[in-house]
Amino acid sequence: MTTAKASPTKKAAAPKSASPSPSTAPTVDPGSPSDPGSPSQDKTKADPGASKPVDIKNLPVRDGEEPWVKAELDAVRAALQEDIARFQSQIEISTAELEGLLRDGSEGAGRDPADVGSANFERRTELSLANNAREMLDQSELALRHIEMGTFGNCDECGKPIGKGRLQAFPRATLCVTCKQREERR
């Protein structure tokens, strides 16, 4: 009889912990793009949005540019999805390499100081590569979300159109050329 009472309490505990998880998962994505769990959640968010048609007519373009057409936007979306897969793979490889380097340790009896220095340099380099891949992944996922929300192409700084040509060449761009040049001068 006590077993019967224990199993309902276990069942009751599981739904309680399961219900906050879905409500917290969506709030984690926009707030913390560097969260390791967010890439998979962002990807699932972007997939349902892909089924919704984006009103291409409302996407901003600069004066003198032709409006976006579906094939152009699909090409940009596909490039971003390829980038996301590539960056996720790079992060997995870098993480595995870092784990191996950390497991080996940097100091120990009988290790040559040059070997220790070399191991430390490798760790710093691998950490830098992993962080760069995470930043690129976050930027790619953000651009994909902007496409799905229909807000793709507005400059984060001035709000003017970034430019279709710039976005086709570099879909992760968040600044128009003028604002980017101003930022680089600082």
Image (tube, rainbow, N blue to C red):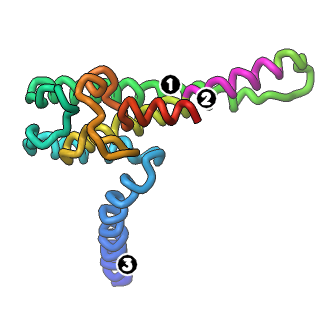
Residue at 79 percent of width and 28 percent of height: 106
Q: Which mark is residue 6?
A: 3
Q: Which one is earlier in the sequence, the residue at label 1 or at label 2?
A: 1
Q: Amino acid at mark 1?
A: Ile
Q: Is residue 45 visible?
A: yes
Q: Which mark is residue 128?
A: 2
In the rendered structure, the answer to whether residue 28 lies left or right of residue 15 reads right
Residue 124 belongs to the span the image colors magenta: yes
The quadrant the N terminus occupies is bottom left
Q: Nearer the viewer, residue 63 or 162?
A: 63
Q: Which one is earlier in the sequence, the residue at label 1 or at label 3?
A: 3
Q: Looking at the magenta stretch, what is its main secondary structure?
A: helix
Which of the 4 image quarters holds residue 24? bottom left
Q: Which residue is mark 1?
A: 93
Q: Which mark is residue 140?
A: none
The quadrant the C terminus occupies is top right
Q: Amino acid at mark 2?
A: Ser
In the rendered structure, the answer to whether residue 157 lies left or right of residue 97 reads left
Instruction: Look at the image and give the residue range highlighted in magenta.
Output: 116-129
Which of the 4 image quarters holds residue 170? top left
